[in-house]
Image (cartoon, helix red, strand yellow):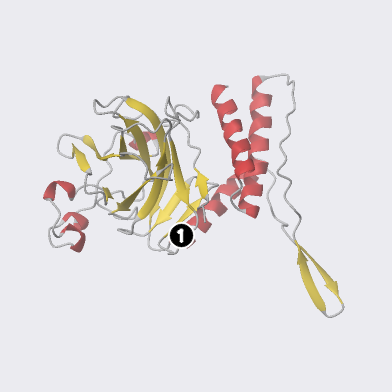
Amino acid sequence: MQQQFNEVQIPDLLLPLLPASPGSSSDDYEGPFKFKILIDQHRTRNSWIYSPILNKVFIRVADPFPIDFKWNPQVNNLYVRATPLFSQPQHAQELVTRCIPHTRATYETNRDVPQYIWDHVIRCQSVNAEYYGNKEEKRHLNVLVPLGVPRTGMNTVRLLYSFMCQNACHTGMNQKPFEVVFTLEDEGGTVYGRKKLSVKVCSCPKRGKEKEENDFFKKMSFHGAALPNKRRKTKKVGKKSFTVISALDTRQYTAKIRTSSKQNLIFLLKRAYNIMAGDLLRYGPNEELEDCLYDLEKQLGKL
């Protein structure tokens, strides 16, 4: 059976490694190889959970997280670099490193691991993984892995990553939100694609996801967006009851709108985005909805 994936449509990011401020463009940078990352939604464990609304993974410390990388044409000699960066602009230049307790030699995840890797929040289980960056020199820590080519009959390469420190650790991330930037590179370090994924490492991924999604929709409500308050209607027939859930219309429509100002146009696009994001939360992952949301993100990024 062919696996079904949720394609992560991710805004572009200008790295402090490359130049300096995250989130300056909302356009996805697939580059000449149409670089994508895919997340398998049919997992068998509860160690992590993905929120398509937030484009964020909630995961327990040190548990493996699979990511599938896709590029076309599938040439060899390409690499993927994973770099953790703080999401908020005021912390963008700070290094994302592990806390002091997690970097001690006696900590179980540091056994039989070279000491220069102990500071890295992200590890990859590939035997070919190489770790770069330096805490003392204030160079962002990252892990670089050769992609090779997909196996026969496949069009993606899967890598397993682990996050070795929690967001709540006081001498490490200290509650600062972070994201992982994946860059597609050649041997000389030339970047051909870039994708971004927010991550929260916590003890209860499901609870963390529910809380942050609720907070997201509270903000939407504050700004006047329509919320999915009533998702179901219950009808009674005699002593029995059944639940009716309205079907989701995934047909795509296009409309040409004239507005009196740029501000009004931005408001309308954001309102449409919030409404469809609410549908995505109610009905779960949906490729048609996510395509529409991605198109709106691109339009907003150009205004």
Q: Is residue 21 visible?
A: no
The residue labelled by disc 1 is: 43
Left or right: where does residue 246 sit relative to residue 291? right
Left or right: where does residue 74 sit relative to residue 126? right
Q: Is residue 190 shown above or below 44?
A: above
Which residue is rendered at x = 27% and y = 49% of the image?
124
Q: Element type at marker 1? A: loop
* Extreme residue in the right direction: 238
Residue sitting nearer the eye, 64 or 298: 64
The x, y position of residue 95, in whole percent, is: 26, 39
Left or right: where does residue 190 sit relative to residue 232? left
Left or right: where does residue 55 sit relative to residue 232? left
Q: Is residue 183 visible?
A: yes
Which residue is rendered at x = 41% and y = 45% of the image?
68
Quadrant for residue 111, please give it: bottom left
The x, y position of residue 16, in whole percent, is: 31, 29
Quadrant for residue 87, please give it: top left
The x, y position of residue 266, in whole percent, is: 63, 27
The x, y position of residue 294, in whole percent, is: 57, 35
Q: Is residue 20 shown above or below 60?
A: above
CA neighbours of label 1 inside 10 A, class few (<14), some (14 to 19), many (20+): few
Q: Is residue 286 shown above or below 265?
A: below
